[in-house]
Amino acid sequence: MNAQRTHDRTFVRTFFTSPTAVEGEDDSAKMLRSAAQLRGMQAPDIWVPDNEDATAPSMRDEGAHNIVEVVAEHGAEFPGEIHPRVVWHRDDPATRHQGFQRMREIADPDHGAVDYIDGFVIPEVGDVDDWKKADEFITIVEREHGLEAGSLAMSVIVESAAAELAMGRLRDAMGRPSNNLERLFLLVDGEVDYTKDMRGMTPTGELPPWPELRHNTSRGASAAGLIAVDGPYDDIRDVEGYRDRMTENRAKGMTGIWSLTPGQVQTANTAPLPPENGRYILEVDGREVDLREEGGVQVYEGDDLSVEQVGDDSYRLMAGGTKQELDGEGLGEELRDRLAYVPSMTDIVDSMEEFETAKAEGRGHLPGGDDPRLPVPGSLRSPPRPA
């Protein structure tokens, strides 16, 4: 694959959608204006003025106008990226044409918004040829308006089996002179329409969890140099469930998640981040207990675990009501089995840098066989001295 990314961002936590026009309001752009003024941890990495599912069909022309007006006014101060979502459908040329016309309007330099528009989100895509159609329309928009080729990114919502299968063909399609698919940015799961396309049913009517889709999206993004984003988490009051979903996603390499409210944005912007300082945790009687560092030694404070030296190389380990007689090597192994390290952001960044250096030198892995995805500082690789 010879494709080169045309965007710099490598990490997305939040994908926040807002209706572009609301019926029955004196100012139909009210929710757009509110979203455009989000700041701090409530500001998403990616803001998506949603002129598709979040906006009634009768309001979408007005919605496109609202995007232009609000982004032209507030885009310069917005701290994240702005990627409007337009209508599209793999089986409907008329819908695709509507999306094309609205992209032309939003990106028209005379309207004053395109300087702050980073790309477009294309929903309901089908096979790779359909992705190429969307790319061609964006290419035409760039050329008509005198914009730099590839300056507008393209993200897709994976809402069909055809789109899921297409992700496996991206590596072959990207980088060919017949398309500009290098502009691809995000692969975003849309489980609601995906469930309909798959004819999925559950006894309660709830959405299936679709772990396979999330895995495939993460795999497709990794193979093509893109970023994977999970779909909406509808129960906005279930903060712990939202955090658990993000934890599961990060284990799959899916860094981003759809956010439906500023509250979810704040949760997603903060919860997945590694701690400022790394720490050890020790499993004791089915519980995880934080250790305290004291003079380079990891210290356990509690009554459920103790170590007593009973000979030159003999130790008695009391843990959870059980007693073990161990030599020094056995004690070290037992404590290692109970020990886990929670890496800090610095640990992760340093480990990634070491891994990239090792890979460039043809070594592939870090010296000593450590897995670079599980960074452990050198000073912590030996078992902690019992205290």
Image (cartoon, rainbow, N blue to C red):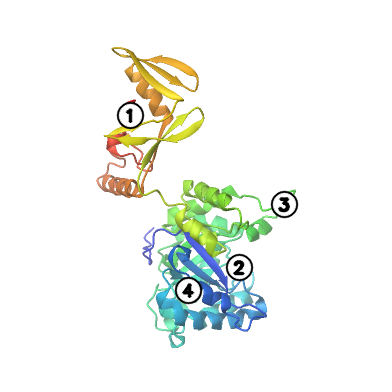
In what element is the residue under mark 3?
Answer: loop
**N-term mark: 4 or 3:** 4
Of all residues, the one furthest to the top in this rendering is 311
In the rendered structure, which amino acid carries the disc numbered 2? Arg
In what element is the residue under mark 2?
Answer: loop
Residue at 31%, 42% (x, y): give it.
364
- Marking on residue 384: 1
Q: How far across and down, in percent of the image, does residue 87 sit?
A: 59, 73
State how far apart marks 4 and 3 are (Cα).
Answer: 40 Å
The mark lying in front, picked from 3 and 1, is 1
Q: How far across and down, in percent of the image, does residue 23 sit?
A: 66, 79
Disc 2 target residue? 90
State how far apart marks 2 and 1 are (Cα).
Answer: 58 Å
Look at the numbered discs 3 and 1 and tell me whether their residues touch, using CB distance below 8 Å. Answer: no
State how far apart marks 2 and 3 are (Cα).
Answer: 23 Å
Which image quarter is the N terminus in?
Answer: bottom left
Disc 3 target residue? 201
**Does residue 226 appear anywhere in the picture?**
yes
Image check: 28 left or right of 252? Answer: right
Q: Residue 181 lies in what quarter of the image?
A: bottom left
- Marking on residue 37: 4
